[in-house]
Amino acid sequence: MSQLVRVLIVDDSAYVRKVVGQMLSRSPFIDVVGIARNGAEALELVEELKPDVVTCDLNMPVLDGVGFVSAQMARRPLPIIIISIAAGAGAQVLAALDAGAIDFVQKPTALATEKLMEISDELIEKVKAAARAPMRRLPLVATVTAPPLPPARIAEKGNVDLVVMGISTGGPQGLKLLIPKFRADFPAPIAIVMHMPIGYTEMYAKALDDMSALTVVEAGETEQVSAGRVYLAPAGRHLTFRRRGESIVTHLDIRPLDAPYRPSVDVLFQSAAEVYDSRVLGVVMTGMGNDGREGAAWIKARGGSVLTESQDSCVVYGMPRSVVEAGLSDAVFPLELMAQAIMERT
């Protein structure tokens, strides 16, 4: 990176503030410029210190994490990363993301122990990525969901039996704008891998289901795959497919163990290509890294198609870039046009 990333740490625990500061200081590209004990202090320090990125706890006195994110986004959009434990905080994390937080990292423990250092590498990478994110592209979720799009004009009907999607940073907000655009009669099932820590995907799927005409579920074991349903891979397990007689069912597994992410976009895409052959449409959207590139190659090798989200709408243009630069993208669309592009191909 060409310059230091200036970070403000917000947490009511002195120990956590110290440990997070130590973690971030390991990187020569990060400068911790200040600390705050609650959201109210953070609002003042943001104005004074002008940080590039803020890391923020959720449960704090005076003004909590969700309140801080909402207030700061109303003043001046700024990359905010939530650091939270899963137990009992799922609804708050999702609320913070809806309010504009760019990403979140799960604490391994609620206790003041050295175990917190386990998130060091992940936090550093997410802070550096967040610093590059153009905040005008963050798709804030509207309080009123737009109605589903009208039926698409079909040029070549019936050539896709499954849509698979991979998404990461910016994903919780992006999917809440994308999935509700599909009509209830959408003719193909949709399977999604989104990089999320354990403890959030079931709650997120329910929230997405409430605002969508399609039925959105956290994928279970041996569920029959059918049109009109969206299957979100559960955090911690890969989502794949198996044939069972005339039907195709979901399968969950911790293997392969060497995948950088679990669930993995590559694993989902490869399985889809193996089971559905050429009748797969892959969609790679905003996120860090290159998860989805190898999977896109599998889809293309079997005769399927791959769409990627354009740099103009990505919060982090990492995953789509890797697919485009590998020559595996058939077409590129911004988030606001992606649903229509998918419908025209199914």
Image (cartoon, grey):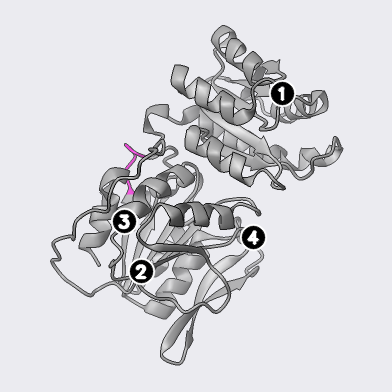
* C-alpha span from label 3 to label 4: 26 Å
Which residue range is magenta in the image? 309-313
* C-alpha span from label 1 to label 3: 45 Å
Q: Label 4, on which residue?
A: 236
Residue placed most toward the observer, 242 or 40: 40
Q: Earlier in the sequence, mark 3 or mark 2?
A: 2
Residue placed most toward the observer, 237 or 220: 220
* C-alpha span from label 3 to label 2: 20 Å
* C-alpha span from label 2 to label 4: 25 Å
Instruction: Judge whether residue 76 can be spotted in this image.
Output: no
Three-letter code for the amino acid on which mark 1 is drawn: Pro
Three-letter code for the amino acid on which mark 2 is drawn: Gly
Per the image, label 4 sits on a secondary structure element best described as loop
Residue 215: x and y in percent read: 42, 64
Q: Earlier in the sequence, mark 1 or mark 2?
A: 1
Per the image, label 3 sits on a secondary structure element best described as strand
**Residue located 60% across and 44% down the image:** 91
Q: Label 1, on which residue?
A: 61
